[in-house]
Image (cartoon, rainbow, N blue to C red):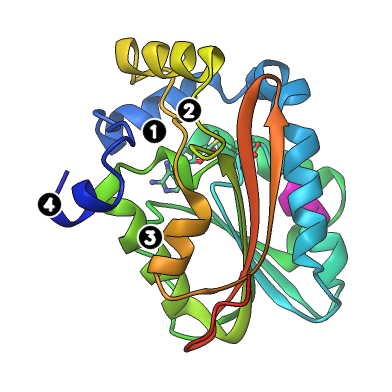
Amino acid sequence: MNKENESKAPDILPVPRTKEEAKRSYDRISRYYDYLTGAFERKYAEMALERLSVSEGETVLEIGFGTGHCLKRIAESVGPKGKAYGIDLSTGMMEISKERLEKAGLEDRVKLLCGDAASLPFDDSTFDAVFMSFTLELFDTPEIPKVLEQIKRVLKPEGRLVVVSMSKENGESIFLRLYEWIHNKWPKYVDCRPIYVEQSLREAGYTVKSKEKVRLFRLPGEIVVAVNRISGNIV
Ligand SMILES: C[S@@+](CC[C@H](N)C(=O)[O-])C[C@H]1O[C@@H](n2cnc3c(N)ncnc32)[C@H](O)[C@@H]1O
């Protein structure tokens, strides 16, 4: 962790695993992922996606699309004149999503890429909106501002970003402490950990439009809606 991030977020746990380890782990669980997380995360991912308010004809990116449930909805919302893009580290996740999109007859309006979102392979000002569901908290602390900077680069001016994530806000609880203990013990398997979403977005220069606190079972989460504006936070 570098000094700058250490001073801003001293209590965010590190994510001590390599991208290769992350890829292997998500490849391994891709076929069972929906059974593992369905009840826990899906509801909030869908709630966050509603906040993105995707319209017909838009160009929208999902980062860390997993098994593709939200990407399918995004593809439906952009319609035949729009385009959905997804980038994910895991080829296993990509295969599952591809099957889902093909089954829904949506593959023509979606482009799937396998890669690391720390370096987005898109031109500047490409997207009207970017969506991230339970993925920002997988990046190690020094990488979070870099990922947010990459997103800012590929978003159009006034483009929207919605992030839903485990949150470090709301103070400590026994469940949070237990979860962090598990993360510390098996970071290669339990790689998510709570972060400060709103603060990270503000520090990266986004205008925060709204923030909702949610409960992921007993753990705190945040849904933050932000805009790629030059200045002026309004919350
Ligand atoms: C916790 S899952 C969430 C999946 C989906 N967004 C959801 O809400 O169900 C995180 C996803 O991010 C992907 N991922 C992890 N690290 C990544 C990275 N550096 N770049 C792009 N995707 C990544 C994983 O492969 C996985 O599909």
Taking 111 as reference, is 114 above or below it? above
Residue at 42% across, 64% down? 148
* Chain part drawn in magenta: 69-73
Q: Position of residue 140 (x, y in %)?
A: 30, 42
Amino acid, disc 3: Val
Label 1 is placed on what type of residue? Lys
Q: Earlier in the sequence, mark 3 or mark 2?
A: 2
Q: Nearer the viewer, mark 4 or mark 2?
A: 4
Q: Is mark 2 within 8 Å of ligand 1?
A: yes
- What residue is shown at x 47% (from left), y 63% (from top)? 201
Mark 4, secondary structure of its residue: helix
Depth check, mark 3 against mark 2: the one in front is 3
Mark 3 lies on a secondary structure that is: helix
Q: Tell whether label 2 touches label 3 (CB within 8 Å).
A: no
What residue would you read off at disc 2? 26
Amino acid, disc 4: Lys
**Marks 3 and 1, the one that precedes in the sequence:** 1
Q: Which residue is mark 4?
A: 3
Task: Place residue 19 in its image quadrant.
Answer: top left
Q: Vertical placement of 44 versus 108: above or below? A: above
Disc 1 Cβ-to-ligand 1 distance below 8 Å? yes
Q: Secondary structure at mark 2?
A: helix
Q: Nearer the viewer, residue 49 or 193?
A: 193
- Point out residue 194 in the picture as x, y percentages from the top left corner: 47, 34
Say whether mark 3 is within 8 Å of ligand 1.
Answer: yes
Looking at the rendered image, the quarter that the C terminus falls into is bottom right
Disc 3 target residue = 147
The residue located at (31%, 35%) in the rendering is 11
Quick one: 58 or 136, which is closer to the camera?
Answer: 136
Numbered label attached to residue 125: none
Q: Which residue, given by chain and number where applicable, does mark 1 sit on?
A: 23
